[in-house]
Amino acid sequence: MRTLEWDYDKNELVMIDQRILPAELKFVSLHSDREVAEAIKDMVIRGAPAIGAAAAYGMALSAVHSKAKSRESFKLEMKDAANVLLQSRPTAVNLSWGVKRILNIVENSHDPLDTLKERILQEAHIISDEDVEINKKMATFGADLIDDGDTIIHHCNTGSLAAVDWGTALGVVRMAHEQGKQIHVLVDETRPRLQGARLTAWELQQYKIPFEIISDNAAGYFLKSGKVNKVIFGADRVAANGDVANKIGTYMLALAAYDNNVPAYSTVPTSTIDLSLPSGDQIPIEERDPDEVLGISYQGHQVAPTGARARNPAFDVTPHRLISGIITEKGVIYPPFLENIAKTLNTEE
Amino acid sequence: MRTLEWDYDKNELVMIDQRILPAELKFVSLHSDREVAEAIKDMVIRGAPAIGAAAAYGMALSAVHSKAKSRESFKLEMKDAANVLLQSRPTAVNLSWGVKRILNIVENSHDPLDTLKERILQEAHIISDEDVEINKKMATFGADLIDDGDTIIHHCNTGSLAAVDWGTALGVVRMAHEQGKQIHVLVDETRPRLQGARLTAWELQQYKIPFEIISDNAAGYFLKSGKVNKVIFGADRVAANGDVANKIGTYMLALAAYDNNVPAYSTVPTSTIDLSLPSGDQIPIEERDPDEVLGISYQGHQVAPTGARARNPAFDVTPHRLISGIITEKGVIYPPFLENIAKTLNTEE
């Protein structure tokens, strides 16, 4: 099963509700761009590639259910849908990439409206299928970097659930495992939303890859112990110079890897690379609801005292000097990143 | 109220149960060295200075309730109590320091048994009173380093609850606040036991010092933002070269501070400095129950999937190259630490 699928009987988008995994595997059905935007905002679905595909399907829902009679009013509806979706989350560039691919079709089409609607839905399917293909290519390039016997620290969730299937960094781990390499994963729990302890742990159980969950704080200890061979994570946006915006905590993890000469790899489809931004300083960082920090209980007890406030930036930027390589579907990009990213993005596959 | 107090009516030790704060302020009464050892192991009481004093009172409980008739059997009982207490937690050196201060009296005394018992209890009181005095001195030295308007990141709990009163690093913050300096504290929640979100937040509320709780992962983001002026934490053991063993996550926090030229201070009584260890590599690191990592729920939902395992090192070692200064009751020690720690410890106050 893919993270999100189109139901042709009902013309709706079906996805796993990632907020309640692993306690329950539940599906939700979405019927409009607005419902998809809400689902992205609430993290029913998350992960840069997954929300790129979800946004494209959000556009498709708007198209398929449109009652517009003229091309002009249809175009206005699609632009409105695009705006709604683009506002759902600011950091991952894949979201706007998915929306723009659909808008391109709308802008350049001369088809009758019904044909256009069908083409939009097809484009969402293509984005979705491409994502799986791209992820498998990334996984294959990345798996070459993983050695038999490696212990790997992984941050957040970058598996099937973060994409349509396979995922980015965790796809690399899965591919190496399928190649027969013995791997042990130390899973950063990834506060505040605990995507590591909830989603990555759940996926690793399905793949039968041995793992242990650690508090994010413990990554430095294990890196310093000399027992960790690789650090791997995804990214929500990569700047032209190789700076990586990713789930909060990645920067400190990369610092600890660097301090102990352990290579740290970011794994992204090239659609996550935003050449319009010279450096990570220009990447917008979303600050989310403080309840994500405050809303935990520890062994049944309240944690923060009543009335306490919290801050909750959802991402941070890891400077490219701490990144050993960026694994993409076109190969692994090594420093100097400014030069090599440009070169890779201009290469035809 | 102090974190721990002796009840003369019942000859028992009374302490706050820190496991259930801030949900509930509850006291527990302990009657034997074994009960104190259990309380330390279970973290009813925690914090290096606090468990030093608690261990001394554990020895006093053993002495006061002893039914030994001869000096010889009394000494054996005290040695047995010492062993029980020393095994409760391995990392904080204050624990063995507190036990040894009592054992010294036992070894060197020629008093009748009843007088000796009384002297042992007095020594526990002295350790407890000294702790408060020492902490106030540290707080005063440390407060000189804090500027009006500072934003400070603080890790774990190092306040009154971590000591008999005042505490170490949080004592510095409190003293600066009492001097009228405007301070804002970003409180690392400090997974897995969440001493920051639970205990430090609770203490800061009492002192009316403005604060916000952050996930430990977010410290790097705020340090990189340029809005943090100081990082401050305690220590459970400091080696002769200035390497600092402290609550898990301190190493990554210190790395992020260093990477952004923000000074990072460890605050410790000199009893926490262990000159017998040349470097932090020799400090024993306790690994605690994985349930401390797994035993949280997020917004009412299970976090880790059933059957998942975890690793839980409770401390890490921060190399002295990342430490800007060590605040003690004898003044602030600056690099080169090997030389200056030795000099400071040989100085009479």
Image (cartoon, coloured by chain):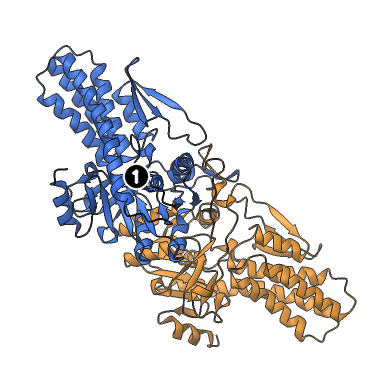
Chain colours: A orange, B blue
In the image, what residue type sits under mark 1? Glu
- Position of residue B221 relative to residue B54, above or below, is below
Residue receiving disc 1: B287
User: Where is residue A319, by image quadrant?
Assistant: bottom left
Q: Is residue A107 left or right of residue A130?
A: right
User: Where is residue B254, by image quadrant?
Assistant: bottom left
**Outermost right residue:** A69
Q: Residue at x 85, y 81 (%)?
A: A71
Of B199 and A9, nearer the camera is B199
Q: Quadrant of the N terminus of chain B?
A: top left
Q: Position of residue B245 (x, y in %)?
A: 29, 49
Q: Quadrant of the C terminus of chain B?
A: top left
Of B345 and A113, nearer the camera is B345
Can residue A148 be seen? no
Q: Residues within 10 Å of mark 1 (few under 14, many from 20)?
A: some
For numbered disc 1, what is the local secondary structure?
loop
Q: Position of residue A35 (x, y in %)?
A: 74, 61
Q: How many marks?
A: 1
